[in-house]
Amino acid sequence: MNLTKLHGLLGLARRQGAVYLGLNQAVDALRKGQAALALIDEIAGKNAQKRMSDTCKTYQANLYTLPQGLLSKTLGMNNLLTVSIARATIAQAIQMAVDNKNNEPLGGNEFE
């Protein structure tokens, strides 16, 4: 995982308005087909992890677990544990930044 690149891409996505912040917004965006992938902090609760995992599997989106505090630090919000990224080129770039053999998607299929 390229943390420097991921940090920059998440900031860019936020400025573009392509980030759905928090569990409820992230899940709603996935259900409406507005989001291509989801990111969750490794310290998120079991219920949040299950809800995101189930939603991503149902709506064929990839879910990635990120190191503790990365989302909060990058997006400038305390206690931010889940986000989804809108279907756009930025989502593909973020997926490439987090994709590697040690960080496989937890659910869903590749997005178009």
Image (cartoon, rainbow, N blue to C red):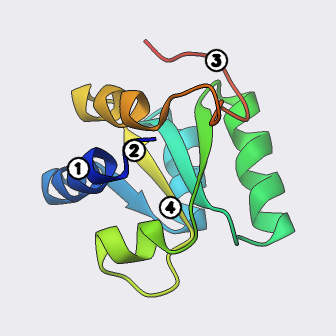
In the rendered image, which quarter contains the C terminus? top left
In the rendered structure, the answer to whether residue 36 lies left or right of residue 103 reads left
Mark 4–mark 1 CB contact (< 8 Å) = no
In the rendered structure, the answer to whether residue 82 lies left or right of residue 17 reads right
**What residue appears at the point 42 percent right and 37 percent down from the top-left corner?**
34
Circle 3 residue: 109
In the rendered structure, the answer to whether residue 67 lies left or right of residue 108 reads left
Given the current orientation, which residue lies at the most extreme bottom position? 78
- The residues tagged by marks 3 and 2 sit, at their Cα atoms, a distance apart of 15 Å
User: Considering only order in the chain, which callout, 2 or 3, is on the residue closer to the N terminus?
Assistant: 2
Badge 1 element: helix
Q: Which numbered tag is attached to residue 85? A: 2
User: Considering only order in the chain, which callout, 3 or 4, is on the residue closer to the N terminus?
Assistant: 4
Residue count near mark 3 (Cα–Cα under 10 Å), binned few <14, some 14–19, many ≥20? some
User: Considering only order in the chain, which callout, 1 or 4, is on the residue closer to the N terminus?
Assistant: 1
* Residue 16, horizontal then vertical, whole percent: 14, 51
**What residue appears at the point 72 percent right and 42 percent down from the top-left corner?**
55
Badge 2 element: strand
- The residues tagged by marks 4 and 3 sit, at their Cα atoms, a distance apart of 21 Å
Q: Which numbered tag is attached to residue 25? A: 4
Q: Nearer the viewer, residue 60 or 69?
A: 69
**What residue appears at the point 62 percent right and 36 percent down from the top-left corner?**
103
Residue count near mark 1 (Cα–Cα under 10 Å), binned few <14, some 14–19, many ≥20? many
Mark 4–mark 3 CB contact (< 8 Å) = no
- The residues tagged by marks 1 and 3 sit, at their Cα atoms, a distance apart of 22 Å
- The type of residue carrying mark 3 is Asn
Q: Which numbered tag is attached to residue 13? A: 1
- The type of residue carrying mark 4 is Gln
Res 88 → quadrant: top left
